[in-house]
Image (spheres, grey):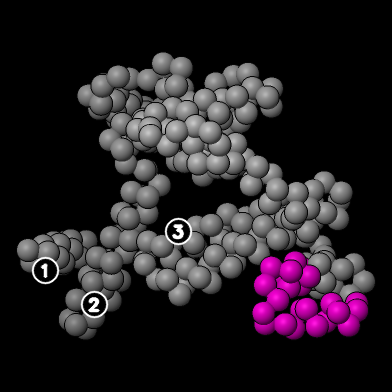
Amino acid sequence: MTKDSDSLVHDPDGGLPRLLEIMRRLRDPDTGCPWDIEQDFKTIAPYTIEEAYEVADAIERKNWPDLEGELGDLLLQTVYHTQMGEELGLFSFGSVTKNIADKMVARHPHVFGDESREKSADQQTADWEKIKAAERAANAEKGALDGVAVGLPALLRAVKLQKRAARVGFDWPQTTQVLDKIQEESAELVEAHQDLTQAEVEEEFGDLLFVMANLGRHLGVEPEAALRSANQKFTRRFNQVESKLNAMGKTPEQSNLTEMDTLWGDVKKDERKVSE
């Protein structure tokens, strides 16, 4: 520990160097925080995923002060991983920022290079995919699905896998064909529920979810965002059902499905009146 280090850590205008020094100090094997010293990439990864979702949640709620805080939390995750990488001699914050800057310049020749910006959005997307394909080839990724991260949330990974397969022509050309497949998978799930084992039920349920993700892609709907919105809507409506029960001097446990379903219908009617 040095005087300069202390000055930087306590400098409110220290910016990114201050944050990097704080993390270095937290990980110091002699004077750092015992909990932080014990962590590794694997133990920190769940926090990184959680913080990314909290950023998305703040955006969904349009809570900009919360977003500012959540972006800081997400930045801390990058700093945490790069500090561990530097300790192991793998990479540093500097090399990580250099790599992403180089990638953005290489992927946007119409902004940072000689290519014309006079392109349609579709042409720019096609060019982007060509650049990414060249990058995958340079990384010895031969299969169409190589490089799709296994640790992604399942719905997000399903869409990415389907997009990769679609690039090589493995995709239904019509949305109606996806809808037909949903009916087929639904029927198989009903059959599995009636006659098959729990493992087979789980498999058929997974197949149905996978096709639903594909339908979202064909409709231009991001499944994760759609489900997040559905969760929020359910939470909002159920909270109102609880409020109505509370006004009646009841809790959900003191009610029954018939009564709560009626109140649920009332909540939906109230929402429609407000939106009209």
**Residue 114 part of the magenta-drawn span:** no
Q: CA distance from mark 3 to mark 2?
A: 28 Å
Q: Magenta residues?
A: 1-23
Q: Secondary structure at mark 3?
A: helix
In-image side of 242 versus 28 (left or right): left
Residue at (49%, 36%) from the top-left corner?
110
Check the picture and name the quadrant holding the N terminus: bottom right
Q: Which of the numbered marks, if any, corresponds to residue 243?
A: 2
- Tell me which amino acid carries mark 3: Ala
Residue at (32%, 20%) from the top-left corner?
172
For label 1, the residue is 274
Principal secondary structure, stretch drawn in magenta = helix
Q: Which of the numbered marks, if any, corresponds to residue 56?
A: 3
Residue at (86%, 55%) from the top-left corner?
87
Q: Earlier in the sequence, mark 3 or mark 1?
A: 3
- Tell me which amino acid carries mark 1: Val
Image marks 3 and 1: residues in contact by CB distance under 8 Å: no
**Can you give x and y, in whole percent of width and height, for residue 232 in the image?**
33, 61
